Amino acid sequence: MYFALCSACLISNPSLRSSFRSQSPTFLPSICDQILSQSRSLNEDGQLYEGHVNLCLQVGSTVGVVVRVSDGGLKGQVLTSDAISVTSALLRAGAVVKKIVDRVTIATHAMYLPKSRKNDEVRHNDGNLGNFLWMYGATRMANPFTTLMYHDDVLTGDIEENAASVSGYLLASANAFMLDKYEKSIEYISIVRQRVVQLDVPTVIIGIGIQAEFKDVEDVSKIALFDFHADFLNEVVARQRSPSIAVRGDFTETACKNVHVNNCISMGCPSLTISHDLNLGRIMKTRWDATMEKIQKGERLQKLIITLPALQPAENPEKYDSLVSMFLHLYQNHEVYFIEQMGYDRSNFVNYKKRSTKIVKPEDWKRFDNVEDWIDFVSDADLIVSTRIHGGMAGIATGTPTFVIPTDFRIMELVNAMAIPYLSMEKATLPFESLSKTVSLVEKDFDLFERNRRIKIYEYVRILGEIGVEIDPALLEVLNAPL
């Protein structure tokens, strides 16, 4: 067995470097085909398990890896067995080695597994595509080549013994604080609280937040978590040096403070860090302006994507009818695709549509079992109209013109925390006149979005540092790029 230096390819080939950075951290892609095709560690999809990477090197802002491969097919490649030889090879190639980074091993509560037949089959049965997007963002946020993650489920067999192998706990979560579902919330919180106590290592939380409808909260300033929520958070606080509970937004931060938990910080969704574009706000503005020009000219948009609301028609008939009526108008006048984010989306829509003469063709419904295909599909859209936060963030991650219509407190606080374009429910449910009129009502500030994005990335650098994890170096480049 030998070691082969994939980072040499990355340094000399910018396109490979870009491809390398875009991958999910749980697996390493076979971008050095002539090397990885010889590996005995490839999985069924031709990808290399991260656990078989033996050395990580950082050269400037590019992180490379040394992988274990078999003897054959390595002509012209660097062969080595130790860090000194690898470093020497890099220096001979003219590279300046910034540092050799020790691998950090952590436990995580939600880990996105990359696109593969097996992983997609598991996700297909989940029923909520949105879950995968925030998991994708949370998993990719860490330096992918210096961080080894184990799902906390793997550690639960003998968690006290296994805890010795991890140095920190990255607890990524979502709708954990369900103010309208006490029993369901306490069941989930009891599980994660137990894991925090059993692992007993430095712990941070990202992405966690409240779940509440607008009608359920009369005074936002008095919104509060349940006592068992506070008990759980205090276990986490006891394992932190500085405030490192990244909550979805100001509403959740207020709910924490009202039960005397002061380590919560309004940060939005981890999906905000999916894009590695150096100035995503500028890209969003450029593409938004181009789409607005088409709309003002009365052109038929060739790809308009809609995600349907989580509202249940029986519970919110007027709001649901107003939104879907607008969507059907758009479908009649543009090339529209509907994303099935939840299992009930199509059935709700079909039941509504029985009162309409407009027919949606089967091929205009799209469902994805992985984030990679979802993001790829929306990346060239003219416009995305989303009544769900993650349907909107899939577009934001690619710089696609997008606005979100918040239908509950959860979505509203996320929109505010990330400064993404939005259209209030009050305006969205006005009698529909035209797409031009609707988009003119969208609240947006792309400069604010980009400044806020960088503030959040900077905070994530600190928060991950609480458990000894480096952020992806591509996100560090964002911080250093000019506005």
Image (tube, helix red, strand yellow):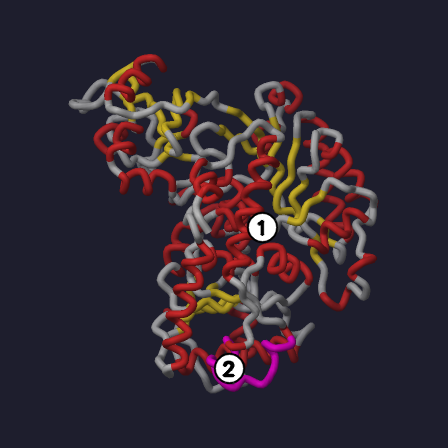
Given residues 138 and 112, the one toward you in this image is 138
Residue 378 in percent (x, y) is at 40, 61
Compared with 56, 325 (above or below) is: below
Q: Residues within 10 Å of mark 2 (few under 14, many from 20)?
A: few
Of the residues under marks 1 and 2, which one precedes in the sequence? 1
Secondary structure beneath dot 1 equals loop
CA distance for labels 1 and 2: 29 Å
The region drawn magenta spans 426-439
The reply to whether residue 364 is in sight is no
- Check if residue 208 falls in the magenta segment: no
Disc 1 crowd rating (10 Å Cα; few below 14, some 14-19, many 20+) is many
Residue 328 visible within the image: yes
Which mark is drawn over residue 437? 2
Q: Position of residue 255 (x, y in %)?
A: 77, 51
The residue depicted at 61 percent of the width and 27 percent of the height is: 168
Image coords of residue 413 (percent x, y): 66, 58
Q: Secondary structure at mark 2?
A: helix
Three-letter amino acid code at the position of disc 2: Lys
Amino acid at the residue labelled 1: Cys
Residue drawn 53% across the image and 57% down it:
449
Residue occupying image coordinates x 48% and y 84%: 434
Residue found 57% across the figure and 27% down from its top: 468
Residue 165, relative to residue 186: is it above or below? Answer: above
Res 269 label: 1
Verify CB contact (< 8 Å) between mark 1 and mark 2. no
Between residue 402 and residue 286, name the one nearer to us. Answer: 286
* Quadrant of the image containing the N terminus: top left
In the image, 337 versus 155, the foreground residue is 337
Q: Nearer the viewer, residue 329 or 417?
A: 417
Q: Position of residue 422 (x, y in %)?
A: 56, 67
In reply to whether residue 428 is colored magenta, the answer given is: yes
